[in-house]
Image (spheres, rainbow, N blue to C red):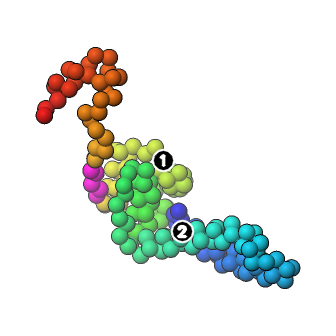
């Protein structure tokens, strides 16, 4: 994920250089007599890298234009969403650091790690500083009355079932 304008500029420059290099490699392999299948096998990793880089660039441009970010399905996507919000608001890491009253390197480090291990309180503070709100909906995706529970509770299973409303 591209997180700031400097990374964006570097990524676009790298993309152009890598595309030219790929084109040069394709020509060189043809000139050396490699067939298409062998050439593809050799160049597919580079093509895959370029496709990923192009997608990262498109994602950054979409976010920077303020396109709708969408929902996150679980808290694993929270860090990327917080970064995307900052980018969509047109705020640099330096500006954000000032608002958060932390050093810019702290913001850079947090974003590099995509806010792994962030607490709900800290995420809430970040949203507040960004003047954004978030809703949380918890969905139970398991069967509470599963028989495995009573097998593991050493005799408490029948009391737990009896206390549960029907």
Q: Is residue 75 left or right of residue 23?
A: left
What separation in Å lies between label 2 and label 1 (alpha carbons)? 20 Å
Q: Mark 1: few, some, or many residues within 10 Å (few <14, many ≥20)? A: some
118 shown above or below 12 = above
Instruction: Single out the residue that lies furthest toward the top.
Output: 155
Q: Is residue 21 visible?
A: no
Picture residue at 35% right of the left edge, 70% below the top: 68
Q: Which residue is mark 2?
A: 56
Asked if the residue at tag 1 contacts the one at tag 2, i.e. Cβ–Cβ closer than 8 Å, the answer is no
Residue 17, image quadrant:
bottom right
Residue 69, image quadrant:
bottom left
Residue 95, image quadrant:
bottom left
Q: Which residue is mark 1?
A: 116
Q: Nearer the viewer, residue 57 or 29?
A: 29
Q: First in sequence, mark 2 or 1: give its number.
A: 2
Q: Nearer the viewer, residue 78 or 145?
A: 145
Q: Mark 2: few, some, or many residues within 10 Å (few <14, many ≥20)? A: some
Label 2 sits on a secondary structure element that is helix
Picture residue at 25% right of the left edge, 33% below the top: 145
Label 1 sits on a secondary structure element that is loop
Q: Is residue 127 left or right of residue 6?
A: left
Residue 54: x and y, percent?
Answer: 57, 73
Which segment is the magenta one? 133-137
Q: Is residue 119 left or right of residue 166?
A: right
Residue 90: x and y, percent?
Answer: 42, 70
Image quarter where the C terminus lies is top left
**Magenta segment main secondary structure:** loop
Q: Say whether residue 22 is magenta.
A: no
Q: Nearer the viewer, residue 156 or 146?
A: 146
Picture residue at 47% right of the left edge, 50% below the top: 115
Residue 133: x and y, percent?
Answer: 28, 58
Numbered disc in front, either 2 or 1? 2
């Amino acid at each position: 994920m591209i997180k700031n304008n400097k990374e964006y500029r570097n990524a676009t420059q790298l993309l152009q250089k890598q595309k030219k290099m790929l084109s040069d490699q394709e020509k060189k392999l043809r000139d050396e007599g490699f067939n298409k299948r062998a050439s593809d096998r050799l160049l597919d990793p580079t093509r895959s890298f370029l496709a990923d880089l192009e997608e990262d660039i498109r994602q950054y441009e979409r976010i920077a234009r303020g396109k709708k970010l969408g929902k996150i399905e679980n808290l694993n996507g929270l860090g990327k969403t917080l970064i995307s919000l900052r980018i969509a608001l047109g705020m640099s890491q330096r500006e954000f650091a000032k608002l958060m009253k932390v050093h810019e390197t702290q913001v850079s480090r947090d974003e590099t790690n995509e806010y792994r291990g962030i607490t709900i309180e800290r995420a809430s503070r970040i949203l507040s500083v960004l003047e954004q709100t978030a809703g949380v909906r918890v969905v139970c995706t398991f069967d509470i009355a599963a028989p495995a529970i009573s097998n593991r509770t050493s005799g408490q299973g029948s009391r737990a079932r009896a206390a549960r409303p029907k």
